[in-house]
């Protein structure tokens, strides 16, 4: 998995690409989130439009990101989830 960040409409958009599997990717995402918190940018949109697969570790990574942002007074929203990933989110 890789991700890019950009700023639009007063929030930061994090666009994931590839397979979201957790592990080392979770560490790099967490580091990026803390950089954003330090810069007082706590409203995040995660764009999953280019994600092909997500496992339970990847889902845990997103839940951890949501918790991190809410504890800092912000929020995290998900956009463009495929039907398969949306089903995983609904079941969870």
Image: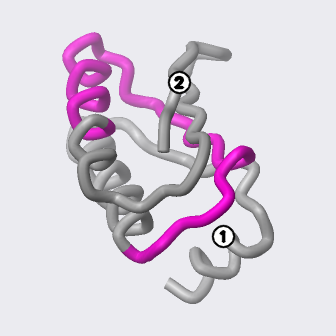
Quickly name the residue at label 1: 85
In the picture of the structure, the residue carrying the numbered disc 2 is 4
Mark closer to the chain start, 2 or 1:
2
The colour style of the image is one colour
Q: Secondary structure at mark 2?
A: strand
**Residue 60 quadrant:** bottom left
Bounds of the magenta segment: 29-56
Of all residues shown, which one is farthest toward the bottom? 91
> What residue appears at the point 59 percent right and 34 percent down from the top-left corner?
15
Check if residue 21 falls in the magenta segment: no
Q: Is residue 74 left or right of residue 7?
A: left
Q: Position of residue 51 (x, y in %)?
A: 65, 52
Secondary structure beneath label 1:
helix
Q: Is residue 49 magenta?
A: yes
- State yes or no: discs 2 and 1 in contact (Cβ < 8 Å): no
Residue 67 versus residue 42 in the image, above or below: below
* Point 29% across, 49% down: residue: 26
Depth check: give the residue in front, 67 or 13: 13
Q: Residue visible at 43% across and 42% down?
A: 75
Q: Is 71 situated above or below 5?
A: below
From the top left corner, tell me how far across and down residue 72 is, in percent: 23, 36
Q: Residue at x 75, y 50 (%)?
A: 80
- Measured as percent of width and height from the top left, residue 45 is found at 57, 37
Q: Is residue 53 left or right of residue 33?
A: right
């Amino acid at each position: 998995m890789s991700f890019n960040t950009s700023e639009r409409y007063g929030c930061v958009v994090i666009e994931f690409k590839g397979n979201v599997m957790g592990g080392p990717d979770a560490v790099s995402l967490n580091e990026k989130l803390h950089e954003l918190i330090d810069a007082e940018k706590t409203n995040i949109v995660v764009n999953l439009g280019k994600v092909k697969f997500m496992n339970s570790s990847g889902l845990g990574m997103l839940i951890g990101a949501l918790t991190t942002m809410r504890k800092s007074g912000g929020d995290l929203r998900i956009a463009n989830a495929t039907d398969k990933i949306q089903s995983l989110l609904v079941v969870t």
